[in-house]
């Protein structure tokens, strides 16, 4: 399961509205190689599901990830922070053994 906080949900809905995203669009979350800790998160809007997709519903939002990324993301919470010290979207990932100071990459 991938969880979505109220703040993240509000921001996702605002972005969808501002960018005129299709009503059937969902959030695709992936883990890719890169970043100072070895793995990085990638977030995009998508409208097409793939054969190996894992689909989750939380807090009224649909979050989709591929099977490989799911191994790294299981139990992760997507959150959003704004303000002077805000990070934007960030992940609270219980599987990460180490994260970089910017919060955009991790290792397991």
Image (cartoon, rainbow, N blue to C red):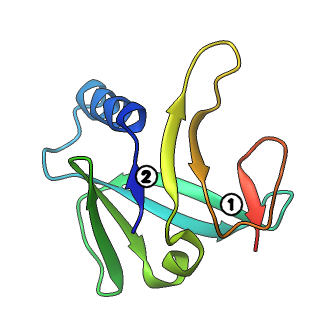
- As drawn, 87 above or below 92: above
Tell me: residue 61, above or below residue 29.
Answer: above
Residue 97 pos. (x, y %): 79, 67
Identify the image quadrant of the N terminus: bottom left
Q: Are marks 2 and 1 in contact (CB under 8 Å)?
A: no
Q: Residue at x 29, y 66 (%)?
A: 56
Residue 85 location, x and y as percent? Answer: 71, 19
x and y, in percent, of residue 83 in the image: 60, 14
To which quarter of the image does residue 48 belong? Answer: bottom left
> Which residue lies most toward the top here?
84
- For numbered disc 1, what is the local secondary structure? strand
Would residue 23 appear left or right of 71 to someone viewing this image?
left
Rendered image: mark on residue 44: 2
Asked if residue 7 lies left or right of residue 61, the reply is: right
Circle on res. 40: 1
The percent coordinates of residue 77 (x first, y second) are 49, 53
Residue at the image point whose x is 72% and y is 66% from the top:
96
| Residue count near mark 1 (Cα–Cα under 10 Å), binned few <14, some 14–19, many ≥20 | some
Q: How many marks overall?
A: 2
Closer-to-camera residue (14/73): 73
Q: Residue at x 51, y 34 (%)?
A: 80
Q: Residues within 10 Å of mark 2 (few under 14, many from 20)?
A: few
Horizontal side of residue 71 vs 98, given as left or right: left
Q: CA distance from mark 2 to mark 1?
A: 13 Å
Identify whether 67 is placed above or below 6.
Answer: below
């Amino acid at each position: 399961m991938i969880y979505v906080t109220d703040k993240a949900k509000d921001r996702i809905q605002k972005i969808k509205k501002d960018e005129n995203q299709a009503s059937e669009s969902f959030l695709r979350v992936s883990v890719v190689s890169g970043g100072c800790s070895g793995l990085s998160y990638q977030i995009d809007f998508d409208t097409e599901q793939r054969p190996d997709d894992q689909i989750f519903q939380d807090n009224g939002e649909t979050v989709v990830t591929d099977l490989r990324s799911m191994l790294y993301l299981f139990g992760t919470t997507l959150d959003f922070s704004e303000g002077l010290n805000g990070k934007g979207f960030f992940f609270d990932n219980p599987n990460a053994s180490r994260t970089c100071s910017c919060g955009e990459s991790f290792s397991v």
